[in-house]
Image: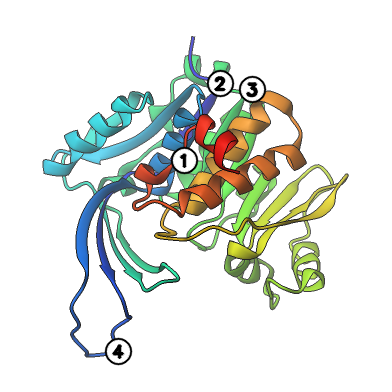
Amino acid sequence: MGSPIAVFGSINMDLVIYSQTKPMEGETIFGNSFETFQGGKGANQAVAISKLGGDVTFIGKVGNDIFGQQLKENLINVGVNTDMLYEHEGESGVAFINVFGAESQNQIIVVPGANSHTTSDQISDNLLESVQIIISQLEVPAEEVEKVFLRAKELGCYRILNTAPSIKISKELISLTDLFIMNESELESYSDTLVQASDLNSIIEAINNLSLRDDQSVVVTLGAYGVFIYSKDNQEFIEGHKVEAIDSTGSGDCFVGALANSYLGNRDLVEATKFANKAAALSVTKKGASASMPTMKEVNLVL
């Protein structure tokens, strides 16, 4: 028997520099510290689910370099099923991350490495038959995500697409997706509509311009401002939680994983989004991406 949730996506080693200020073009500044963390949107989302008590399988690729085995071991240590995490003869994915100042804003450059070689046939039919929710992002080849979602649809699996990073995707992949999770800049890009986090009318207009079916839903994350849910039955804004942010890296991935884990249990998109909003807020109070994912106990106790 496989896991009820599967994540098809990227896994990286994050190389993170913390500094008080953002350097000007051509300027050299001193940083406060340098740390390495497990990252990659797919791996982060899988870790979020596992740390919240969910049963999850991660499907992806690592390199046969020094980072590959470490990344795999990190997933195993937090309870993620790695039976379908394959090794590529080459370098693992890496992300170069700069975290700036008291607001903990970040800039990220990703070198895909092994992630570019992730394929849909890594997922066995036996696993997919047991999966109730499958999640993917766009740090692995979009055409492979499309193939996975097509197979998942045929088996009645609920399909979540986190549209990050914002790249061109096919009409078929859009059609195959049940739930889109995106931030305001991604919504702006896909809808070709100006979006302001504080203007719900601009968000609704942008979602309408996506021309989705009634059976498709969208959740728009708006950073500290909150979250907006758009579905056939609900159009609801949920205010963000006020916390002392240390590092926002991976908070969006925490949101995706937490939402999927909650939705598996209750099939209520509003309640799942409210829970994910709490978990993501808590994640920014810790350093790192996967390392910052909270447990169920932490979410229930702190917020």
Residue farthest to the front, as pictured: 301
Label 4 or label 3, whichever lies nearer to me, is 4
Q: Residue at x 74, y 29 (%)?
A: 267
Q: Amino acid at mark 3?
A: Leu
| Spot occupied by residue 77 in the image (x, y as percentages of width and height) | 29, 26
**Quadrant of the image for the C terminus?**
top right
Q: Earlier in the sequence, mark 4 or mark 3?
A: 4
Disc 4: which residue: 24
Disc 2: which residue: 4
Q: Amino acid at mark 1?
A: Gln
- Relative placement, left or right, of 5 versus 78 is right
Disc 3: which residue: 155
Q: Earlier in the sequence, mark 3 or mark 1?
A: 1
Colouring style: rainbow
Disc 1: which residue: 45
Q: Amino acid at mark 2?
A: Pro
Q: Earlier in the sequence, mark 1 or mark 2?
A: 2
Q: Earlier in the sequence, mark 4 or mark 2?
A: 2
